[in-house]
Image (cartoon, rainbow, N blue to C red):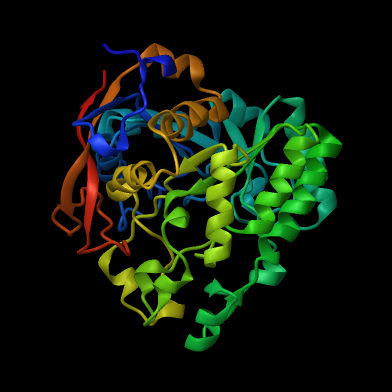
Amino acid sequence: MLNLLPNTFTQPNIDSKPDHWLLPPLVDLCARLREPGRQQHGTLKSEGSAARANGFLHVVTPPDTDPVLENGPLLKGLRERAKQDGGIYLHVLGALTAGLQGERPANVAGLKQGGCIAVTNAGYAFANDMVMLRTLEYAATFNLKVFFYPNEPSLSIGGVAHEGYIASFHGLQGIPWLAETVALSTQLLMVEETGISAHFSQLTCRSSVELMRWAKDKGLPVTCDVAMHQLHLTDDSLEGYNAQAYVLPPLRSNTDQKALIKGLQDGTIDAICSHHEPLNDTAKQAPFAEATPGISNFDTFMALACKLVYDQVLTVEQLVEKVCLAPARIAGIEQQYQQIGGAVLVDPNLQWQVTAETMLSKGKNTPFLNQTLQGKVVETYFD
């Protein structure tokens, strides 16, 4: 069994195009595997197998399933099935409020006993700020981290695209960047008040990066991530009502994308997640505003990661930090991560076409469909 440490990696000469990279297993901080309740889009077997083949051995999943993940014994069974059926280690975020309704705390004690790594209200709103404050204080008594997905519903409700020229031109209801930063501002102040450790997932805009930079300079116990597709796509991808690029939070402007990349480079953004959301064929066939948001990301993740290296956005060492080591620390699974070990062999030069046949995920919903990408996991050494 290979157990690789950061200092075993050497930075490749970009011009020489090294034949292969040997990386530690990838850790994904946000992926929806569609079980329980939405097996028409994916299963623990289909999505676990796709994750494993594409280098992910450890996957964190939110609790917004059907039923909601708020029962300790349910978490244990889900983890066991993910390992047995999909061959991955599933790490579950428990529901912060009962039913994710935002009105009263969930059974956090039972969730911790059931092995959740953190709690979250996913993308759902709290009834009011007092409920948020009390539930955070409650989670703090159990020493549980809280994951936030910043969104102020009163500003984003009904929106399907970034509020800007593209949305206006296509007659689509926009989601302003304020929907994210207003929520993020409140949540950061709550973290400061309660002292709870918090992770902010899938930031999309420049102001959010600036707020996170302020929070870290202030010494708040916070980390954050960005979805891989936000580093490569902007709302320009929505041209022609391309529902394959419909995702929430939405693809933002070129200015926002540049800020995300800078935040990634200077360490403000700690990690890159997949935000994998597989969907069946019919989910994207409705008119844009009526289609289901989401992108299937396991299969394209490594190619897009390789592009970050070849575009000199990140070095290989920095990439390993963002997709392997930092996510393991954030998820609180470092000890397990080291004990299990494993390795991923990547051919950064392999060109391949994204088709329904080459994608292993049950969901073929990707804006990269029929495009030729470079870079792929060619072997995994797990267990």
Residue at (44% x, 73% y) in the render? 236
User: In this view, which residue lies farthest toward the left?
Assistant: 357
Q: Is residue 9 left or right of residue 121?
A: left
**What is the residue that sits farthest to the front in this orientation?**
15
- Compared with residue 361, is residue 380 higher up or lower down, i.e. above or below? above
Pick the residue in front: 22 or 134. 22
**Observer able to see residue 324:** yes
In the displayed structure, 231 sits above or below 92; it is below
Q: Is residue 142 left or right of residue 227?
A: right
- Residue 263 locus on image (x, y percent): 59, 46
Residue drawn at point x = 60 percent, y = 55 percent: 123
Q: Position of residue 36 (x, y in %)?
A: 40, 47
Q: Position of residue 374 (x, y in %)?
A: 23, 48
* Along the line of sight, the residue nearer the viewer: 363 or 308: 308
Identify the residue at horizontal 31%, vertical 32% (top origin).
13
| Above-or-below relation of 302 to 382 | below
Residue 70 seen in this snapshot: no
Q: Is residue 151 left or right of residue 129?
A: left
Total marks in image: 0
Task: State which quarter of the image contains the N terminus.
Answer: top left
66 left or right of 177? left
Residue 118 in the image: state x and y as whole percent: 60, 33
Q: In this orientation, which residue lies closer to the viewer: 235 or 144?
A: 235
* Residue pictured at 52% horizontal, 65% vertical: 254
Q: Quadrant of residue 53?
A: top left
Which image quadrant for residue 312?
Answer: top left
**Quarter of the image where the C terminus is located:** top left
